[in-house]
């Protein structure tokens, strides 16, 4: 089942159950997906593939996290709670993130597979990791780890396990 089909099935189930926050969040996902499809169509492409949908969902998660921080700083716990609920629903559609050891192993395998020897080869490594582990890694953090690895330093993790890939 593709992610698009899963969104359709999940929204039907949520509507039947009368779960308004879930319906609202899935509709928001579908609207963002439709915007991306329209943007891709303008560029002469078809509907976006699942790996790009996963990237869209990760972006949405990050946006919710930033909103939660702002709401908490401004003493708006009710709004932060709503964002947390949306974050939980969005994260249900993402695959389980790789752990620290799995991420380090994936980086080592990608470096070996591409024959990367210096930071100049970082693009090849990241491209391979994106192709093989879309939606399971936070590439903002991974790029720093790859750069450190190709620069000859050991991989060190400083991830916070707050429900996000790390």
Image: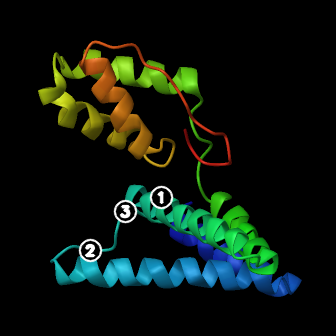
The CA distance from mark 3 to mark 2 is 9 Å
Q: Secondary structure at mark 2?
A: loop
Whether residue 86 is visible here, answered yes or no, is: no
Residue 138 appears at what percent x and percent y? Answer: 47, 44
Left-right relation of 145 to 21:
left
Left-right relation of 63 to 110:
right
Render colour scheme: rainbow
Residue 97 sits in quarter: top right
Residue 132 appears at what percent x and percent y? Answer: 38, 37
Residue 55 sits in quarter: bottom left
The residue identified by callout 1 is 54
The mark nearer the N terminus, 3 or 1, is: 3
The residue identified by callout 2 is 46
The residue lying furthest to the front in this view is 74
Foreground: disc 2 or disc 1: 1
- In the picture, the disc for residue 41 is none
């Amino acid at each position: 089942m593709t992610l698009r089909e899963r969104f359709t099935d999940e929204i039907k189930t949520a509507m039947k159950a009368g779960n308004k926050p879930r319906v609202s969040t899935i509709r928001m996902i579908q609207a963002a997906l439709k915007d991306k499809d329209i943007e891709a169509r303008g560029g002469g492409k078809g509907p976006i593939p699942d790996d790009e949908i996963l990237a869209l969902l990760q972006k949405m998660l990050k946006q919710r996290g930033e909103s939660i921080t702002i709401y908490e700083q401004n003493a708006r716990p009710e709004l932060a709670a709503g964002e947390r609920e949306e974050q939980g629903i969005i994260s249900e559609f993402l695959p389980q993130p790789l752990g620290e050891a799995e991420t380090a192993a994936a980086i080592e395998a990608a470096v070996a597979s591409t024959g990367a020897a210096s930071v100049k080869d970082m693009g090849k490594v990241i491209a391979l990791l994106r192709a093989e582990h879309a939606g399971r890694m936070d590439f903002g953090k991974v790029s720093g780890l790859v750069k450190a690895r190709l620069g000859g330093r050991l991989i060190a993790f400083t991830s916070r396990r707050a429900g996000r890939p790390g």
